Structures are given as C-alpha cells and as structure tokens.
Image (cartoon, rainbow, N blue to C red):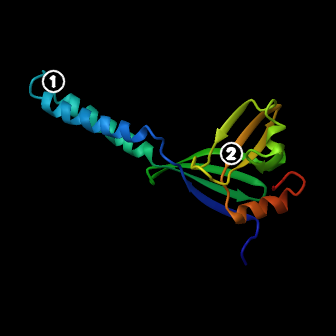
Amino acid sequence: MIDNSYAEHLVKRKQPAYWLAVKAGMILLFILSLLLMARIPFGFVLPVAAAAGIYLVFLNGDIEYEYLYIDRQLTVDRIAGKSRRRRAAEYDMADVEVIAPMGSDRMKEFDRQVKSTVDFSSGADGARTYGIIHNRSGVCTRIIIEPDERMIRLMKQSLPRKFFEY
C-alpha cells in the first residue's frame, strides 16, 4: 500500500546570467596559466590551481533542489553537480503560519514580519512558486519553493487552514 502523505519533487536551479562569463573566464585563466607555466618558477602550480577552480565552478554551477514532504515535515536537499547531496533545510509544518503563492496578498501581509528569505526555487521566469512563512522561536522566515501538484495537494490536505491558493 502506498502512503499518501509522501511527496518528493526535484527542481533544477536556473544558472545566473553571469555564470557563462565565469566559466569562460576560468577556462581562459587555465589556458593563460599553461602558457606561463614554463616562464615562471614553480609555474606548474598555476594550471593545477586553475584546473581546481574550473572543477569547482562547473560543479557548483549545476544546482538542484529536492523537496521531500512527509507527515507535515518539509525537507530540502541541495544537490550540486548531480553527485553531492547536502541537507539544505528541514521545516516542521507545525511552525508554519501560511503557505500561499508568491506575490499574493497573503504573502504581502507578512513582508514586515519576515526577517530572512530562503529561495529554494528554480529561479526561472514564470515559475509557479509558493512562499511558506515559517515562525520558529519568534524568528519569521520566508521559504520559497516550487512544488508540484502532488505536493500542493498534500500540503492543502494536511494544513487546510494555513494553505491558500489563488
């Protein structure tokens, strides 16, 4: 029997506009370091450092977020380079005040109370994002996610008085 209180969704983060320039700059730096390697004492260190920089840039440029909603608990994992998974955050839905689409009037009501915003969405234009107002120990945080239909349905079922859809 399949548990109905479980949903997971994977969202690929859109790369910023400057990311292509960063990648090209790192590759040019590597080529330049290869050319300078013979002319500088200990010049072999430059290409090794540039290669390590290229690896980190390419690895951290490909970011995905995986949302896992189980029994009124939202867990967000950050996946870098489709290989390194780290727990980004974990939220207990008992501490949630409201869940509503971003830009809605419900979200605007909390603009003054929110101390910080955490964006776990794709960042793509036109994405259907939802904001979660999480209040833990008096600290109000806005969490931006991009759930699928199943996760929206589960949140609506488990938190009917806190979930708003426009």
Which residue position holds label 2? 144
Disc 1 or disc 2, which is closer to the eye?
A: 2
Local secondary structure at mark 2 = strand
Which residue position holds label 1? 42
Amino acid at dot 2: Ile
Q: Is residue 145 left or right of residue 166?
A: left
Foreground pick, 39 / 17: 17
Residue 26, image x, y percentages: 30, 36
Q: In this view, does 125 lie above or below 71?
A: above
Residue 77, image x, y percentages: 59, 50
Residue at (84, 38) in percent of width and height: 109
Residue 160, image x, y percentages: 88, 58
Task: Assess disc 2: are there few (<14), some (14-19) or many (≥20) residues with their C-alpha within 10 Å of its C-alpha.
Answer: many
Q: Is residue 116 left or right of residue 161?
A: left
User: From this viewpoint, is residue 40 visible?
Assistant: yes
Q: Which mark is residue 73?
A: none
Amino acid at dot 1: Phe
Task: Report the Cα–Cα distance between label 1 and label 2.
Answer: 48 Å
Residue at (44, 44) in percent of width and height: 61
Residue at (82, 36) in percent of width and height: 110
Tag 2 or tag 1, which sits nearer the N-term? 1
The answer to whether the residues at label 1 and label 2 have Cβ atoms under 8 Å apart is no
- Which residue in the rendered view is the most extreme toward the bottom? 1
Foreground pick, 48 / 130: 130
Residue at (19, 31) in percent of width and height: 32
